[in-house]
Amino acid sequence: MPRNHQAEDFTEEMDVVQASNEEGDKGSSDNALCQIRTAIVPCSAEATPQQLHQTLEKAQRLLFDLGTHKSKKRHGQKGTALSNNDLALALQEDTICSCGHKYSMTHCLWINTDIFPLCLDLGIDLHSSECWVSLLSMEDSVKTELFKFIPPAQHQLMTHQNFGDHFGVGISGVHSEMVSDIKTCAATIFGLNAEFFIGGHDQFSQPECCALILSSANSYTKFAPVLFPDGDTGNLDNMLKTSKMVQVVKVSLFDKASLLGLFVLAPKVKAKIWELRETSAGMLAASFI
């Protein structure tokens, strides 16, 4: 079969490369090369299910090692490898940041919870004056809400000395992502020229653009003010009653492809990454409308 011939040719080329390096280091680099070759060379058409399983297992292990290496390099300084303790700390920080993403999606949206119940009642009235008597009471109220939101297996992350900073980074990241989603989908969602958002604008010569994507404080908002049909007097609880708002939420969860009629959920959409199917059935209901 042509595929087998390609595999044999590629294997021969790899053998030549490996033979040319026989006089070099015979340590871990050779082992890594053999593993990579085994993983990327396609199986023959006569391969058994067991052989396919073994090949997939090796490929997954290599991908995991690659992800670990990238994480080390991303969090390291000047490309130096992190120690195991430093790497564990960096992974904790990434997890905290992800919790911030998830919290922002399920708790900070301006969604009418009577229509789309996003989470269980936490028993905390953040509008109560008792929550705002002092800075300490404010902090305790927010921590209590977070403690009930974050999965029990990750409660120990809240003892991280920089928990608040990394959690805040996760929340603010969602703000920027949603603004970006609105920009890139402007033509489809709002029926506008996509270049109106994507091409950028001069805030001095085109103040009307700022009015659409910036708040009155001249900073990005979670959703662009263009979503507020009644301006500052609008009722935030009514935002999801508009079809435009539902489209924006759908894009924010399932990416731009979700606006296509033949869209099929992929395994790596945001909803899957943030495990929203376990956390928020209401959010998914809003996205499938």
Image (spheres, rainbow, N blue to C red):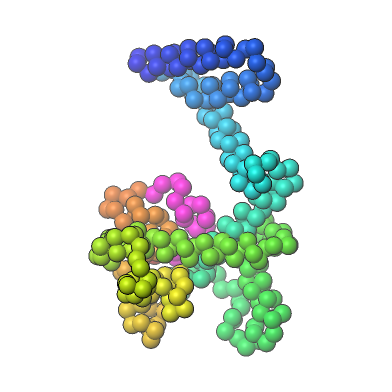
Which residues are drawn in magenta? 265-283
Compare residues 234 and 80 and report the one nearer the observer: 80
Left or right: residue 112 compared with residue 242: right
- Is residue 50 visible to us here? no
Seen as rendered, the residue at the extreme front is: 204
Where does residue 232 sit, x and y in percent of width and height?
39, 84
Compare residues 70 and 127 and report the one nearer the observer: 70
Residue 268 vertical position relative to residue 123 in the rendered view, above or below = above
Magenta stretch containing residue 269, yes or no? yes
Where does residue 87 sit, x and y in percent of width and height?
69, 46
Residue 61 vertical position relative to residue 108 in the rendered view, above or below = above
Compare residues 195 and 117 and report the one nearer the observer: 195
* Residue at horizontal 67 percent and vertical 87 percent from the top: 133
Residue 82 vertical position relative to residue 210 in the rendered view, above or below = above
Left or right: residue 182 compared with residue 98: left
Left or right: residue 132 compared with residue 216: right
